[in-house]
Image: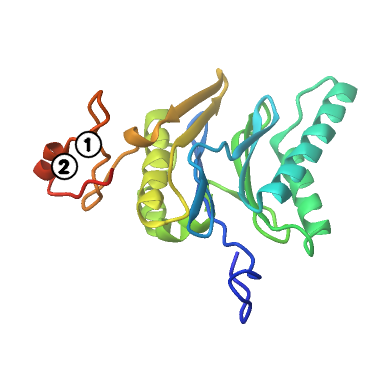
């Protein structure tokens, strides 16, 4: 969200950011998000969960205004629960994506949400639908959104392959998120990843000190039991110590 032109710092709307990533692979789908919630330069939360369940096998990756995307996920989850109770069957991913699109489009003048609907069903397997601001719906092999996505388009486009294995897809999502977190100041903290396939839902949590680092990054501070920063370890890496 851009700061309002001409507005004072106190009156300006806060800028927001995140990174959400999803891709299909042979047999399922993998998706994930970073954990940082920020207002301007202030980090409010380093381990927020930006992935909301819509049903057992369908999830919403959220970016944009947190209250807006939360109310969308709450309503869609309610509608899907009703539909499942009446039909006796699990809802399809396409049904969930169309509900998200409909709510987003009908309230495009009031809601700010760029989302990914990701899931698995018996009809079409793993699926990824992009639902950007204003309510467009697009089915993709892979999709990214949020402020961090601008830094990783080249990586995602060049490294994605059709019919990747589960391990390759999980590594693709993890590395894309880590690269975005390296460059985007509004993305960071932890990584949450989910893998959906015919065997169920598999969750992976990566703490901040285990997120892959790349050349030129500051090393994660190491601390001994007394709490003192081990400057020698950082010095060997040629980096700075923040503690």
- Dot 2 and dot 1 residues touching (CB under 8 Å): yes
Q: For the point 57% across and 57% down, which residue is it? A: 16
Please tell me the numbered disc located at residue 229.
1
Q: How is the image coloured?
A: rainbow
Classify mark 1: helix, strand or loop.
loop
In the rendered view, does 209 fall on the left or right side of 33? left
Q: Which is nearer the N-term, disc 2 or disc 1? A: 1
Determine whether the residue tagged by mark 2 lies in a helix, strand or loop. helix
Residue drawn at the location 49% of the way across and 34% of the way down: 192
Q: Is residue 166 left or right of residue 33?
A: left
Residue 101 on image: x %, y %: 75, 51
State the CA–CA distance, disc 2 to disc 1.
Answer: 9 Å
Q: Is residue 78 above or below residue 187?
A: above
Within 10 angstroms of label 1, few (less than 14), some, or many (20 or more) residues?
some
Residue 234, numbered circle: 2
Q: Residue at x 25, y 23 (%)?
A: 225
Q: Residue at x 60, y 62 (%)?
A: 14
């Amino acid at each position: 969200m851009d700061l309002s032109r001409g507005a004072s710092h106190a009156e300006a709307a806060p800028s927001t950011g995140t990174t959400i990533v999803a891709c299909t692979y042979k047999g399922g789908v993998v998706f994930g998000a970073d954990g940082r919630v920020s207002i301007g330069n202030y980090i409010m939360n380093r381990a927020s969960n930006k992935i909301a369940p819509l049903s057992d096998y369908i999830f919403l990756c959220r970016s944009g205004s947190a209250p807006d995307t939360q109310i969308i996920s709450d309503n869609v989850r309610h509608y899907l629960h009703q539909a499942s109770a009446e039909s006796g069957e699990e809802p399809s991913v396409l049904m969930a994506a169309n509900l998200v699109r409909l709510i987003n489009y009908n309230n495009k003048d009031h809601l700010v949400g760029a989302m990914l609907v990701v899931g698995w069903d018996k009809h079409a397997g793993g699926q990824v639908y992009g639902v950007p601001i204003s309510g467009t719906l697009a089915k993709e092999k892979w999709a990214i959104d949020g402020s961090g996505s601008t830094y990783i388009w080249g990586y995602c486009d060049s490294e994605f392959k059709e019919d990747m294995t589960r391990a390759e897809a999980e590594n693709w999502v993890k590395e894309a998120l880590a690269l975005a977190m390296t460059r985007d100041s509004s993305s960071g903290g932890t990584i949450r990843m989910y893998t959906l396939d015919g065997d169920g839902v598999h969750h992976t949590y990566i703490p901040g000190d285990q997120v892959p680092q790349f050349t030129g990054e500051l090393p994660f501070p190491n601390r001994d039991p007394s709490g003192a920063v081990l400057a020698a370890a950082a010095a060997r890496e040629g980096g700075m110590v923040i503690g």
